[in-house]
Amino acid sequence: MALTACGNNSGSNSGSNNQPKNAGEGSTEKVTLSFMVPNHPLAPQNPNDKLIFKRLEEKTGVHIDWIANPEDVFNDKRNLALATGELPDAIFNSGLTDFELLKYAKDGTIIPVEDYIDQMPNFKKVLEQAPQYKGMITAPDGHIYSFPWIEELGEGKDSIHSVNNIPWINTAWLEKLGLEMPKTTEDLKNVLIAFKTQDPNGNGKADEIPLSFVNDDGGNEDLSFLLGSFGAGFNWDLTLVDDNGKVNNSALAPGYKEGMKYFQDLHKEGLIDKEFITQDWNKFIAKGKEDRYGLYFTWDKANVSGMDSAYEPMPALEGPNGWKNVARTNGMGFDRARFVITAENNDVESTIKWIDALYDPTQSVQNNWGTYGDETQPNIFEFDESAKMLKHLPLNGVAPGELRAKTSVGGPLAILDSYYGNVTTVPDDAAYRLDILKKVYVPDMKANNIYPRVFYSIEESERLAQIEADLWPYILKKRTEWILGKNVDNEWDAFIKELDRIGMQEWLKIKQAGYDRATK
């Protein structure tokens, strides 16, 4: 819902004017800025109804007129505004890709911001404490066009982002049927058959769903975790790096073909959710809350079956050749383009002041997870006055994702590993997840390298976007067809040929060049 009309869109102004829109010299009147933002369906329609933004307005003296659009239409609304010049002063949680960032920088729609960093004590301190981020936000032309979101939680293989789609298995069903935790892919198949045929939920109906997932090729709820039992595995951006620094695509990696045959076998036995092709997140969650799954995949079980449910992480499985591997994602707590300032902004300095307030450590923690002292709903934190520290409160069964959607704001922020124990505590759900990764999955991670956050040139970004627009859907389409029963061996050569026709070899070349630049 658009809460207010975009201001400052006459086209006669530029970011270099730096004249406040409302307040004249000596005026105590608040500065008003217009920001576009995506809005979660669980969040207030007006972001200013969030306690975090109410406090920020009091702290900074800056009032924000939010142009809030539902998440599912935000990109279209944002792109329309950028294309027509009907611009807000800035875009919060912009969601811009590297190509879009460089494109709109090149045509002057958004402005460079590096010259303002010296006016930002909080953000400047972040870059001094963690200088690697300065290079990650600097474009190939040497400019900085956006402010990032940074969330550190562990590093290397121990990073909380190392595995997205943890497999959660119903241990109550295992116990009732007298079954052990699967150790091999064949064990898993037999366990899923038992879940299907032996009525583990005890209601006398064949309504159990042995295995469910959301069919999106590497997302948090995808079954691709299982491909690690056959070779190098699969991750969300299909980019793998071996120990010699050679980049490969997950669909070309050793074992992918055999993994497709395994998925097909599970489907042939009737072990895969019949709605796997069509179900979205909401449908997937609804069935999860009904305790119908034998095995499912997600980041955190609290958001699907509940924190107190009988689901536990299933370790990596040995494949037919005895291989066991957990593929690492290329994820890290970093988003380059969380906030951009448009050329229509007449008060860049007030905008910069407001942004810098978000990089205050205590503020960043709240923006990322939620706040304290809200009398209208549960709180993520309590504020310990004596320690001057935000301490996570027990969730008491509240789904963390839902509470954060209602109370946090995201946007540009920084949470460094050094903040834990000083500024805040590690969230209970994050501590739980980090412990799972360390004990269950890190020991089986074979790869020592991940793909870095390369800032490609506009030409590279454009070409990658063009190739991936056809490549990703084709890979998912073929995987879906193979799960449903098409002959993998008969179609494999044609599959590889079509990947090359779409641009796979060029994709590999660009990716390898980017990796080499970033790691030299």
Image (cartoon, helix red, strand yellow):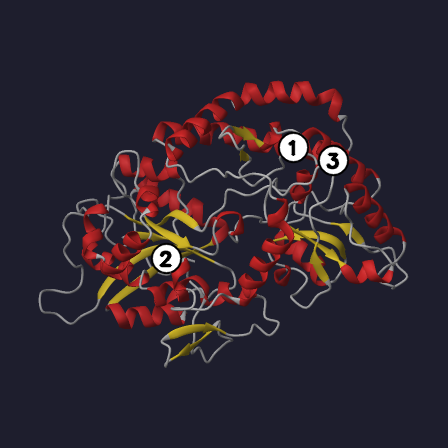
Mark 1 is on which residue type? Lys
Which residue has dot 2 on it?
Answer: 414
Instruction: Find residue 38 and report its image quarter.
Output: bottom left
Asked whether the viewer can see residue 53, the reply is yes
Which residue has dot 3 on it?
Answer: 483
For numbered disc 2, what is the local secondary structure? Answer: strand
Q: Which mark is residue 275?
A: none
How many labels sit on residues?
Answer: 3
Please state which of the two labelled residues, at mark 1 or mark 2, is closer to the viewer. 2
Q: Residue at x 41, y 69 (%)?
A: 50
User: Distance between the Cα atoms at labels 1 and 3?
Assistant: 10 Å
Locate residue 325, reporting x and y percent: 65, 41
Q: Is residue 354 above or below residue 95?
A: below
Q: Which mark is residue 477?
A: 1
Mark 2 is on which residue type? Ala
Q: Which label's residue is closer to the chain start, 1 or 2?
A: 2
